[in-house]
Image (spheres, rainbow, N blue to C red):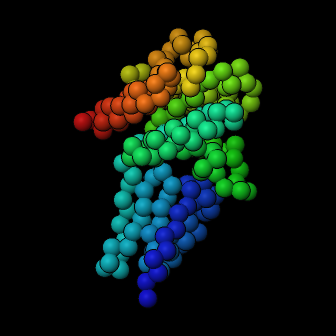
Amino acid sequence: MRRDLNRRFPPSEILAQKDEQAAALILRCLREGNSVEIDGFGTFEPNGNGGFAFKPFEAPRVFIAYATEDSKAADALYDALRAAGMHPWMDRRSLRPGQNWPRLIESAIDSSDFFVACLSSNSVSKRGGFQAEMRFAFDVARKHPLDDAFFIPIRLNECKVPARISREWQYIDLFPSWQEGLDRLIASIRTHSRNRRGE
């Protein structure tokens, strides 16, 4: 009897295991009739003929960086991007207890298609994780072609944009109209995604 149970694994959990062990785990789940999602990459699914197929995600992967004080706005942004058919990544929603979060955050940034930095009066002068994530994202952005958007700064409220960002990147305001700013962000991500695919 086939169980309707799907398994979901973050890439970090797969990478943490030896290749053979990861492959054996995926095959076992597929033989049991389960789909196996590799978070952010795609899904292995049984094909009904005793085999399986991999269906890659075509949705853009979007890393959301924010200060803890802005978590309510970041949650709203996550939900809006997911509703728009994107695959957002956010620490509070994507990390699980016991995971090595510094390594996983860097891995998530590196494997993302876009990095959205939520600038606010809370985040721009705060020391800590948000600043570290932005610095790592700057390094990742250097690997992208010059006319390709990877780093997308957004302002959640009236705040001074750090000089390095204002010199190099155009930002989007999510105020005074959240919806207008959100529409611009989604349109930008979709346009750059299509350009990357050569459409």
In the figure, residue 137 lies in which quadrant?
Answer: top right
60 in relation to 149, above or below: below
Question: Which residue is at 46% across, 17% downward?
Answer: 170
29 in relation to 70, above or below: below
Q: Is 189 in front, or is 12?
A: 189
Q: Is 169 in front, or is 186?
A: 186
Relative image position of residue 40 (x, y in whole percent): 48, 51
In the figure, residue 105 lies in which quadrant?
Answer: top right
Mark count: 0
Relative image position of residue 45 (x, y in whole percent): 39, 68
| Residue 128 as seen in the image, left or right of residue 42 | right
Relative image position of residue 79 (x, y in whole percent): 49, 45
Relative image position of residue 71 (x, y in whole percent): 64, 38
Tell me, yes or no, if residue 153 can be seen here: no
| Residue 69 as seen in the image, left or right of residue 8 | right
Q: Is 90 in front, or is 49?
A: 90
96 in relation to 184, above or below: below
Tell me, yes or no, if residue 103 can be seen here: yes
| Residue 106 as seen in the image, left or right of residue 148 | right
Question: Which residue is at 44% across, 69% downward?
Answer: 35
106 in relation to 16, above or below: above
Q: Which residue ends up furthest to the left in the rendered image?
A: 199
Quarter holding the N terminus is bottom left
Quarter holding the C terminus is top left
Question: Which residue is at 62% across, 62% downward?
Answer: 17
Question: Which residue is at 64% across, 51% downward?
Answer: 95
